[in-house]
Amino acid sequence: MKAYFCILLIVAAGSAVAGQSTTLIGSGFANACAGDQYFGSLPNPGDGFSTITDQYMTCQTTAGTPALASASNSGTVNGNTYSNNATADAGPGFIKVGASNSGMQAIPFPGGAAYAGWNETMTIAGGTGTAVWVVPLTVQGTLDTTGLGALVRVGINAYENYNFLQPYGTLNGFAYGVFLAANGGTSGTRNNAIAFGWEYQGAWFGADNYSPPDSSMVPSYSLNRTLYFAFPFTYGTPFEFGIYMGGVAGEASSGGFYTANSSSYDFLHTVAWGGAGYVVDQNSQLNPNFTLASGSGFNYSQTFGETPEPATGCGLLMGLGVLGWLKRRHS
């Protein structure tokens, strides 16, 4: 039997054209899609999929405080059935996304996709000149795949003034170094199932299932950790920031294999704001006197739904570790 394949395309960098670029300050964005023939690409978190609903795909996109979207789809292609769904929920301080897909690899790119996040403005006082604000996110979730060709990938991106946090320029380069150090280097921002790279502050994780198995296969993957993003800023000057997460549960390729597979990711428990974080200047000095004032009035000095002490203490310890790394790097 002759097999035909269309390999999953990755859109790992570029200008955001939807989602985070149009979401109002202090509001959430949620986008959920399910169906087939649309999931051969992977948008950046903050972009989301089209809002088109047709014979192939069902979508819902909302914005608000909070924003909630869901979609489900099932069908039959050449006698093979598929079923998938997605849900997304977000507002200031939290993101919840999940998606699943089941079917045959012979079906052309079925999948479920959920993207969500929020926008905010922040003014940081308590110092002069420029510095970097390092913010913590609590991330707990799972990615699972079963059967030939199953693939799931999820990313988390941060944006400042509606752009990627890229390592170009002295301050941005310093912030990117802080971002990598705080997350354990490149290996802390991706796992073996991620076969693409980037130069911006983002983290991607995946699970895949191929046959025969090889050492790079990651059928299941779990996250239970704190991720950090580093925003360069000028004291007293407001700036916009956004945190977005999303991904696709689907297949790595579409072709002539009549093998059942399934894929899913579940981050419906928590992707939550972890507290005030810490501020570090370009001389690798912490500023314990900084203050935060958000445009929406949301209190970013506290963890989402909890008291601020545990995350703030963790952030301070992580900050000291980052400073030690930076001092060694510059020595």
Image (spheres, helix red, strand yellow):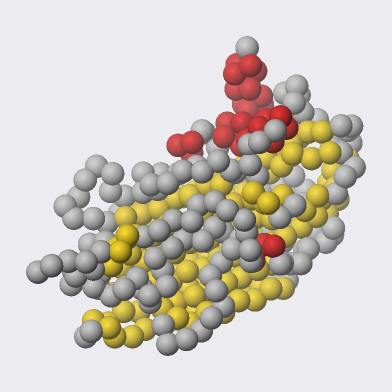
Taking the spot 89% from the left edge, 36% from the top edge, the residue there is 126
Residue 71 in view here: yes
Q: Quadrant of the N terminus?
A: bottom left
Going by the image, does 186 lie left or right of 276?
Answer: left
Going by the image, does 77 lie left or right of 113?
Answer: left
Taking the spot 56% from the left edge, 66% from the top edge, the residue there is 48
**In front: 29, or 314?**
29
Total numbered circles = 0
Taking the spot 17% from the left edge, 66% from the top edge, the residue there is 3
Residue 40 image-quadrant placement = bottom left
Rendered location of residue 328, percent (x, y): 60, 16
Going by the image, does 159 lie left or right of 147?
Answer: right
Task: Looking at this view, name the residue that lies furthest to the left.
Answer: 1
Taking the spot 47% from the left edge, 86% from the top edge, the residue there is 54
Rendered location of residue 210, percent (x, y): 23, 55
**In front: 238, or 126?**
238
**In front: 285, or 128?**
128
309 above or below 144? Answer: above
Q: Quadrant of the C terminus?
A: top right
Rendered location of residue 90, percent (x, y): 64, 66
Going by the image, does 167 lie left or right of 122?
Answer: left
Residue 261 in view here: no
Rendered location of residue 98, percent (x, y): 48, 67
Residue 37 image-quadrant placement = bottom left
53 above or below 213? Answer: below
